[in-house]
Amino acid sequence: MSESAFELIPAIDLKGGHCVRLRQGRMDEATDYGSQPAAMARHWQALGATRLHVVDLDGAFAGHPENQDAIREICRALDIPVQLGGGLRDMAMIESMLDLGIDRVILGSVAISQPELVRTACERFPGRICVGIDARNGLVAVHGWDKVTDVKASDLARRFEHDGVAAIIYTDISRDGMLSGPNLEETAALARSISIPVIVSGGIASIEDVKRCHALRHEGICGAITGRAIYEGTIDFAQAIDWIREQQAC
């Protein structure tokens, strides 16, 4: 696996038009960080973000987009690309989000139930389709993490090996929002098993976690998503971006 560039990607999760963070994907464990997600998005861009990760939490549970107004405002507010996941279950939904200004859409539950949709979307929108794999104990969870399947995360990723997926976003649900450190052993093993770049998600709590992710670039890790840590200040986002820039300038 050749070494790639690395992005530290701030996350905005949308619930009822607000910017929130969950613990282990539980809607009843949401912390509200404000009712102006577009302003929050501009904040992360100003601190050096090169991409923004947005999740429509309501959409993930409803099975269709629910926060279109907030998503549109975020896209209009930024100069950097935005990737979006949550409730995208058919081509019309995918197209509507791309039309709003989203750069890349993330397909999660449909990767299990409708793999042909993923493949067709990759053909129609080259470089703009990611697959989100959310797992608990190595098994894929779907529908807002409400149901755990018997499909191994690594097996699901390999199904799309040659279909033009831009990236796999791998989330260990048990670590998400817990500030307990990412499951890098499992994530790196997944990255080594495929040629698709992998983005780490879930549990990143410190600059040391960022450095550990960055050190795995040669194994196919192309980025890491951070949420609660930058909202609660356990990671200084601007300092982390500066550190990454210094490393990539070497």
Image: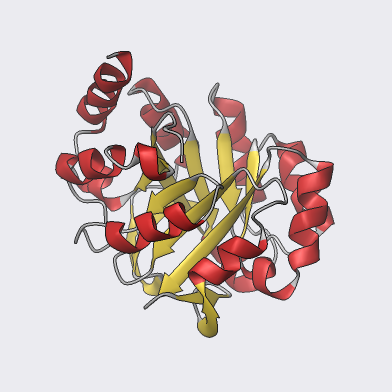
Identity of the residue drawn at 38% across and 44% down: 219
Question: In the rendered view of the protein, which quadrant contains the C terminus?
Answer: top left
Image quadrant where residue 24 sits:
bottom left
Q: Is residue 186 left or right of residue 110?
A: left
Q: How many marks?
A: 0
Identity of the residue drawn at 69% across and 60% down: 88
Q: Please, is residue 20 above or below residue 99 in the view?
A: below
Q: Nearer the viewer, residue 48 or 155?
A: 155
Q: Position of residue 79 (x, y in %)?
A: 55, 21
Q: Position of residue 11 (x, y in %)?
A: 41, 45
Identity of the residue drawn at 20% across and 50% down: 205
Q: Please, is residue 4 above or below residue 115 in the view?
A: above
Q: Nearer the viewer, residue 74 or 166?
A: 166
Q: Position of residue 202 (x, y in %)?
A: 34, 58
Q: Is residue 176 visible?
A: no
Image quadrant where residue 27 sits:
bottom left
Q: Is residue 124 left or right of residue 2?
A: right
| Farthest residue, direction top | 249
| Farthest residue, direction front | 1
Q: Nearer the viewer, residue 20 or 204?
A: 204
Q: Is residue 163 visible?
A: yes
Q: Please, is residue 22 above or below residue 162 in the view?
A: below
Q: Position of residue 137 (x, y in %)?
A: 37, 78
Q: Is residue 89 left or right of residue 29?
A: right
How is colour applied across the structure in the image? secondary structure
Q: Nearer the viewer, residue 43 or 116?
A: 116
